[in-house]
Image (tube, rainbow, N blue to C red):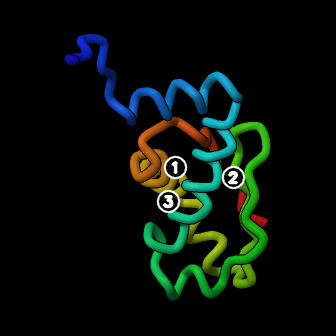
Amino acid sequence: MKRNNAEQIGKLIQQFLRQESLESPLNEQRLLDSWEPVVGGTINSYTRDLYIRNQVLYVHVTSAALRQELMMGRDLLVRNLNKRVGATVITNIIFR
């Protein structure tokens, strides 16, 4: 017996995640996990306590000079992080 109404499993999973309101938290976690690959290991060693609230990524930076440097490249970081996740998860980054 052949079924004609077959759907791709990826679409079904994405539909389920949206339906259960799990897509946004999943994307936020993916973005936090992609921080180190995007900025590199050296910069990552100076950052702590990353969290997202209201589409803003908060990052605690232990070096004042690095904080200034990251602030100048903030727009590029936002684009690269969102691109890596494949969705617009954050709109801004605040370095503390």
For mark 1, what is the residue?
A: 78
In the image, taking residue 64 as reference, residue 1 lies left or right, namely left
Q: Quadrant of residue 21?
A: top right
Q: Position of residue 78 (x, y in %)?
A: 52, 49
Q: Secondary structure at mark 1?
A: helix
Q: Earlier in the sequence, mark 2 or mark 1?
A: 2
* Identity of the residue drawn at 57% across and 67% down: 70
Amino acid at dot 2: Leu
In the image, taking residue 49 as reference, residue 47 lies left or right, namely left
In the rendering, which numbered label is found on residue 73?
3
Q: Residue extending furthest front? A: 1
Q: Position of residue 92 (x, y in %)?
A: 63, 44
> Are the two marked residues, 2 and 1, in contact with CB atoms closer than 8 angstroms?
yes
Q: Earlier in the sequence, mark 3 or mark 2?
A: 2
Closer mark to the observer between disc 3 and disc 1: 1
For mark 2, what is the residue?
A: 57
Q: Earlier in the sequence, mark 3 or mark 1?
A: 3
Closer mark to the observer between disc 3 and disc 2: 2
